Amino acid sequence: MGTAINVEHRAASGVGANIRAEAQLESFDGRFYVLRVAARDDAQEIGRGTVTRAVISVGKFLQRVNTKRNGS
């Protein structure tokens, strides 16, 4: 589950451009991990930043969603 996204737009790409995205694990601390992300077209870097995610229990998450949906 995502907790934060911080991406800097660095350049525009044209319609039909080939885009390559990469992500590298930067750190992991308990339930949370940070990915360093970057995107490039054929000529230049077009964006970079970090994405922070949390490891969750899918069962517990769905149970909470259903509880909220049913108004309980």
Image (spheres, rainbow, N blue to C red):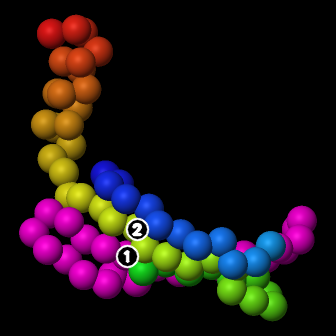
The image quarter in which residue 63 lies? top left
Indicate the position of residue 48 as horizontal and vertical percent values.
56, 79
The residue lying furthest to the bottom in this view is: 43
Observer-nearest residue: 59 or 10?
10
> Which residue carries the number 1 mark?
35
The image quarter in which residue 71 lies? top left
Disc 1 to disc 2, C-alpha distance: 5 Å
Q: Is residue 23 above or below residue 5?
A: below
Q: Element under label 1? A: strand
**Residues marked 1 and 2 touching at CB (< 8 Å):** yes
The residue lying furthest to the right in this view is: 15
Mark 2 residue crowding within 10 angstroms, few (<14) / some (14–19) / many (20+): some
Q: Element under label 2? A: strand
Identified at 20% across, 58% down, the residue is 55
> Which residue carries the number 2 mark?
51
Please check the rendered image and state whether residue 24 is part of the magenta-colored stretch, yes or no: yes
Residue type (three-letter) at the residue carrying disc 2? Val
Q: Which mark is residue 18?
A: none
Identified at 58% across, 73% down, the residue is 8
Indicate the position of residue 44 as horizontal and vertical percent values.
75, 89
| Residue stretch in magenta | 13-35
Observer-nearest residue: 58 or 64?
64
User: Is residue 66 visible in this depiction of the protein?
Assistant: yes
Residue type (three-letter) at the residue carrying disc 1? Leu
Would you say 42 lies left or right of 28 here?
right
Mark 1 or 2, nearer chain start: 1
The image quarter in which residue 60 lies? top left
Please check the rendered image and state whether residue 53 is part of the magenta-colored stretch, yes or no: no
Indicate the position of residue 53 as horizontal and vertical percent values.
30, 61
Mark 1 residue crowding within 10 angstroms, few (<14) / some (14–19) / many (20+): some
